[in-house]
Image (spheres, rainbow, N blue to C red):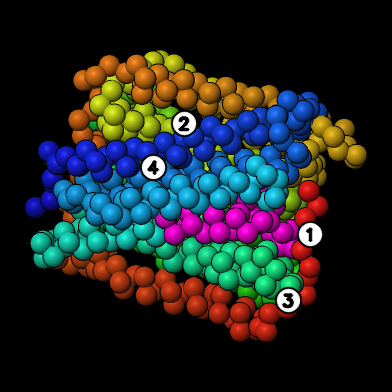
Amino acid sequence: MVYDPSGFELDPGQKRVIRWTLYVGYIALLAGIFHGLAQALSYARIDILGYFPGLRGYYQGLTAHGVANAIIFTFSFANGFLPLMTARATGRQLVRWLLWLSFGLLVLGNVLVIYAVVSNKASVLFTAYAPLKAHWTFYVGLALVVVSTWAASANMFITLARWRREHRGARIPLLAYISVFSYAMWDMASVPIAVSFLGLLTPWSIGILPKIDPLLTRTLFWFTGHAIVYAWLLPAYVSWYALIPRQVGGKLISDAYARMAFLLFLVLSIPTGLHHQYTDPGVSPVMKAIQGVLTFGIMVPSLATAFSIMAALEIGGRAKGGTGLLGWIRKLPWSDPSVVAQLLAMLTFVLGGATGLVNASYVMNQVVHNTTWIPGHFHMTVGSAVALTLMGVAYWLIPYLTGKGLWGSKLAVASSWIYTIGVLIFARGMISAGLEGMPRRIYRARAAYNDPAWDLGGTLTGIGGTLMFVGIVLFFVVIAMTILAGKRGGAPADVPVSETLTAPSLDGWEVHLDRIGLWVGVALLLIALAYGPFFVMYFPARFISPGFTGF
Ligand code: HAS
Ligand code: CU
């Protein structure tokens, strides 16, 4: 028997906290896109930085863009969405005080980060590389955001544990399983960054620690930093696996296959961070090569996802009368804004994944590292697979949480198309110019050195970036109008949870997929093997570098 608590309603007070948690994220998205536009136009040699009131420099704006869009937007969404999914899947209320704690820490963290960035005391970009030094409020603020994700996880673990006590021998509902696994992975992954931010960078920023070890803090950053991209991606995958099949009238093909994908993310996401440091001196090439191989391993669950989701979509398209090899694609609900955004997100992610393959290849990485190829890659992953999915989810989730019907459905569909066309042009520009050696993280409009070979790519980047900006602005028009003027009664009454073709089995090997403790243990073992030798060989740490605050 599959456990199905349909008819379950989350307490209105809890719904409200979740709604505001999500609002924090969407506001961060809005706040971050202005500098995104400035950066994209700069590659086309158009300079609009002077129009930003109060902005004191390019790196200040780029820090705001990265932190707001890649970190605050994504984690605020996950903090609201994943506990909500766990509650819906288990048919249980969440732990109220933990919801509030998570929300409070998120807001407090944001206030500190905003202070640091707006006052131009933390123009160190989202990677916070030492010896660039930020004000302590930046490190502590981001650490508080991390702690807010731990509170959200604790809420999910407790809710699930209570459900399991009442349902001994039952399989964990799939939606709860994949939600909990997403944050279980992140909980392990986020420890190194918390240690680095609170244990090293904050004392150094305050002056207790006179000098810093750049390579150690950088390695701790990437220890968390590759897995962080899956912490952004997995909430989107939760929607693709558990909700989208239902939204297109299909079914998920296999329960066990879905669980295995999330299990592989739990085990493999973390011991791969050194692929961001292939060019760093001071890290053994053997360690880099081991983590390079593991990086190819972490592509497997995404490849598996492509097949699984494609099959679910095909079932939906054929159920609606689609025939032939590809005829089912036309029958997908292309007028449903939530579905369209996510289908376009998936299609873009195929290219995001392909560019990731290049990055991961030890030798090819030398060609693309620190060029605009990399932002080309990550705008087709976090900038569209994730961002567009989170926008698509908003098109049913905000109505569900507010009780107001979606305003401007056609405009919503248009916004996703505009955004996607924009991101593809943008990425085409960044990728081709990157291959010509155009550096990332420069303000080309004011750069002293410019190569004419970058002109075409730069111009495409500017055009694409402008379309992306327009797409997101339209998204905000739709959401703001829904909140302000959406019709009462037009909202979905329930989360669109999918069925699977085959129910989870109650005996046989599949039941072992639910042994969360066991898989966390395997993950920790692999992490120890992949990172242990680095730290053993590296210590004692080298606190040799003074801080730089060249802004
Ligand atoms: Fe990455 C750099 C390797 C995925 C984000 N990445 C970055 C940075 C960011 C980022 C932000 O190995 C820059 C960090 C910085 O500031 O320096 N990345 C990979 C690999 C993957 C990958 C191997 N990245 C992501 C995801 C991200 C993300 C996901 C955000 C969410 N990345 C790298 C490497 C670097 C890097 C190196 C360092 C580069 C350097 O030198 O600095 C893989 O996980 C990708 C696997 C994905 C796939 C695609 C599967 C496709 C699916 C869609 C199916 C479509 C369907 C559509 C069903 C294999 C699931 C059907 C629709 C119809 C209509 C029919
Ligand atoms: Cu990575």
- Mark 4 secondary-structure assignment: helix
The residue under label 1 is 548
Circles 4 and 1: CB atoms closer than 8 Å:
no
Q: Residue at x 38, y 53 (%)?
A: 102
Q: Are marks 2 and 3 in contact (CB under 8 Å)?
A: no
Asked whether residue 11 is in view, the answer is yes
Disc sitting over residue 21 in the figure: 4
- Of helix, strand and loop, which one carries label 1? loop
Q: Which residue is mark 2?
A: 344
Name the amino acid type tagged 1. Answer: Phe
For the residues labelled 2 and 1, the Cα–Cα distance comes to 42 Å
Q: Magenta segment range? A: 124-148
**Residue 170: image tag:** none
Does label 4 or label 1 sit earlier along the sequence?
A: 4
- Give residue 127's quadrant in the image: bottom right
What percent of the width, then of the height, locates residue 479?
Answer: 41, 24
Residue 507 on image: x %, y %: 14, 66
User: Amino acid type of disc 2?
Assistant: Leu
- Horizontally, is 1 left or right of 148 in the view? left
The type of residue carrying mark 3 is Phe
* Residue 343 placement (x, y as % from top left): 42, 32
Circle 1 packing at 10 Å, graded few (<14), some (14-19), many (20+), is: few
Please tell me whether residue 135 belongs to the stretch shown in magenta.
yes
Q: Quadrant of residue 61?
A: top right
Per the model, the C-alpha gap separating discs 4 and 2 is: 26 Å
For the point 68% across and 44% down, the residue is 119
Of tags 2 and 3, which is closer to the observer?
A: 3
**Does 210 appear above or below 449?**
below
Q: Circle 3 sits on which residue?
A: 543
Q: Is residue 459 visible?
A: no
The answer to whether the residues at label 3 and label 4 have Cβ atoms under 8 Å apart is no
Q: Quadrant of residue 394?
A: top left
